[in-house]
Image (spheres, grey):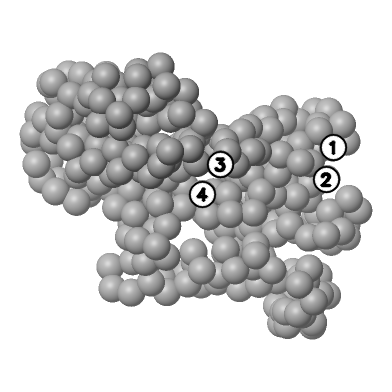
């Protein structure tokens, strides 16, 4: 039921300026579909509805250990062959694997079932720590709420960061989470309000991206040593302070490139890079294209 809620919320109508999707739930046997919370969902669309879909998402279910019906596998394969995007998160990934769509590709699933996926489908390169993995026209996500991460990534990829951020704000969710599933395997108990201080420092950093933000300064604001701060930061976010800041700076740069006509030099300054050349280097390395090419992909700005 959570997975149904994830996709229906992300692809619902979110208001002016945000995309409207032609969304439908489909099944090979239309009618009441049981869920893990005991409340059935009435699905009226059959597999024929998938024939014109640009995106198919295989939702997780409690019977994932049994391969889907041949008609479902055929529908997934046909969609992929005609160029549609095919995605799944949590144990929905098992359906894509059963259809052979993950062979020779990297994929992820809920960390609890990653070993089972790898054992059943040895041709799949399972990465149990990823929140989501984009392999072009096949995208997989981790368990439970990581479905939001995967779907927001799809919006960001197809419509740009500004659009994905708008949908995320409407749902009161972070537009992007750094790190992998490892950060959620254990939940340490806060000690001496350090977690609250860390959250305050991260919020402060988001508002001061135009500044250098060395780790020593962040640690000072958190009232920790650099070593303690780095250790606690990684435990809380699943990534390093440097990687977190880099991702934040690039995400903000994407949004400015899409929504403003600011020169790249000014955008570089606003997100904390010393020059347009440094921003370009990071953008090419992490996004695969220079900033101006990215801008042309989403706007008509020069």
Q: Nearer the viewer, mark 4 or mark 2?
A: 4
Secondary structure beneath label 4? helix
Q: Residue, x 76% and y 36% (percent of image)?
A: 114
Q: Nearer the viewer, mark 4 or mark 3?
A: 3
Q: Nearer the viewer, mark 3 or mark 1?
A: 3
Secondary structure beneath label 1? helix
Sequence order check, earlier mark of 3 and 1? 1
Secondary structure beneath label 2? helix
Secondary structure beneath label 3? loop
How far apart marks 3 and 1 lie (CA) works out to 30 Å
To which residue does mark 2 refer? 98
How far apart marks 4 and 2 lie (CA) works out to 23 Å
To which residue does mark 3 refer? 189
Q: Residue, x 65% and y 65% (percent of image)?
A: 2
Q: Residue furthest front?
A: 192
How far apart marks 2 and 3 lie (CA) works out to 40 Å
To which residue does mark 4 refer? 149
Sequence order check, earlier mark of 4 and 2? 2
How far apart marks 1 and 2 lie (CA) works out to 13 Å
Is residue 15 placed above or below 54 in the rendered structure?
Answer: below
Residue 207: x percent and y percent?
20, 43
Q: Residue furthest right?
A: 66
Left or right of 205? Residue 120 is right
State the image quarter where residue 287 is shown: top left
């Amino acid at each position: 039921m959570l997975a149904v809620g994830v996709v229906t919320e992300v692809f619902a109508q979110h208001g002016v300026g945000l995309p409207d999707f032609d969304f439908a739930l489909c099944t090979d046997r239309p009618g009441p579909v049981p869920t893990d919370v005991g409340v059935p969902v009435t699905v009226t669309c059959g597999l024929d509805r998938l024939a014109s879909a640009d995106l198919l998402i295989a939702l997780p279910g409690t019977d994932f250990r049994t391969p889907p019906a041949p008609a479902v596998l055929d529908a997934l394969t046909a969609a992929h062959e005609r160029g549609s995007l095919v995605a799944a998160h949590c144990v929905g990934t098992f359906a894509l694997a059963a259809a052979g769509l993950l062979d020779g590709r990297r994929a992820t699933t809920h960390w609890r079932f990653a070993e089972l996926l790898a054992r059943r489908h040895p041709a799949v390169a399972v990465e149990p720590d990823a929140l989501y993995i984009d392999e072009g026209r096949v995208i997989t996500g981790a368990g439970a709420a990581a479905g939001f991460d995967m779907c927001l990534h799809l919006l960001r990829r197809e419509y740009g960061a500004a659009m994905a951020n708008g949908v995320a704000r409407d749902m009161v969710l972070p537009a992007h989470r750094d790190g992998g599933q490892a950060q959620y395997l254990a939940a340490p108990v806060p000690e001496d309000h350090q977690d609250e201080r860390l959250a305050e420092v991260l919020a402060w950093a988001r508002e001061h991206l135009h500044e250098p933000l060395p780790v020593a300064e962040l640690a000072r604001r958190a009232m920790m040593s650099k070593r303690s701060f780095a250790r606690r930061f990684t435990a809380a976010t699943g990534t390093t302070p440097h990687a977190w800041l880099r991702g934040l700076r690039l995400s903000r740069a994407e949004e400015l490139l899409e929504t403003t006509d600011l020169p790249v030099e000014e955008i570089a300054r606003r997100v904390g890079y010393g020059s347009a050349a440094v921003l370009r280097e990071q953008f090419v390395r992490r996004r695969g294209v220079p900033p101006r090419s990215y801008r042309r992909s989403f706007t008509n700005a020069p």
